[in-house]
Image (spheres, rainbow, N blue to C red):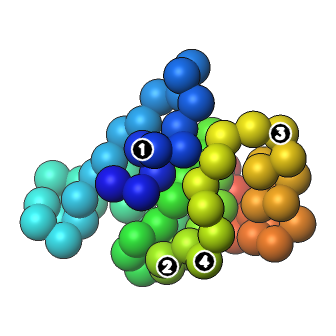
Amino acid sequence: MAVEVGKCRDCELVERNLATNPELHEEAARRYGVRSVPTIVVDGRIKVEGVPDFPWICGEEFYRMLEERYPILHPLE
């Protein structure tokens, strides 16, 4: 997975493969508001829908870029 290579040591990565097990992950997809795959959720908020067009490098600068380029699409309630 592309996100794994950029994940920082303290981050927890959970992959839910909706293509192979949609029923197993239906509740999580509904909770996060997933409309397409792949979707990247960081800290419970959708950050990227679709294939990202940038390298995934964990850090403050990267998170600022995400906030600017990909504002919160579906906040958790």
SS category of the residue bearing label 2: loop
Work out whether mark 1 precedes mark 2 in sequence or the reverse, and give the earlier one. 1
Q: Which residue is mark 4?
A: 53
The amino acid at mark 1 is: Glu
Answer above or below: position of 52 versus 45: below
Q: CA distance from mark 1 to mark 4?
A: 16 Å
Q: CA distance from mark 3 to mark 4?
A: 18 Å
The amino acid at mark 3 is: Glu
SS category of the residue bearing label 4: loop
Q: Is residue 19 visible?
A: yes
Local crowd size for mark 2, using a 10 Å CA cut-off: few (<14), some (14–19), many (≥20)? few
Answer above or below: position of 6 versus 39: above
Q: Is residue 74 visible?
A: no
Task: Find out whether the residues at labels 3 and 4 contact each other: C-beta distance under 8 Å.
Answer: no
The amino acid at mark 4 is: Asp
User: Which sits in the foreground, 30 or 6?
Assistant: 6
Task: Find out whether the residues at labels 1 and 2 contact each other: C-beta distance under 8 Å.
Answer: no
Work out whether mark 3 precedes mark 4 in sequence or the reverse, and give the earlier one. 4
Q: Nearer the viewer, mark 2 or mark 4?
A: 4
Q: CA distance from mark 2 to mark 3?
A: 22 Å
Local crowd size for mark 3, using a 10 Å CA cut-off: few (<14), some (14–19), many (≥20)? few
Q: Which residue is mark 1?
A: 4
Q: Residue sitting at 23 percent across and 59 percent down? A: 17
The amino acid at mark 2 is: Gly
Q: Which residue is mark 3?
A: 60
| Corner quadrant of residue 53 | bottom right
Horizontal relation, residue 21 to residue 59: left or right = left
Answer above or below: position of 42 versus 68: above
Q: Residue sitting at 83 percent across and 39 percent down? A: 60
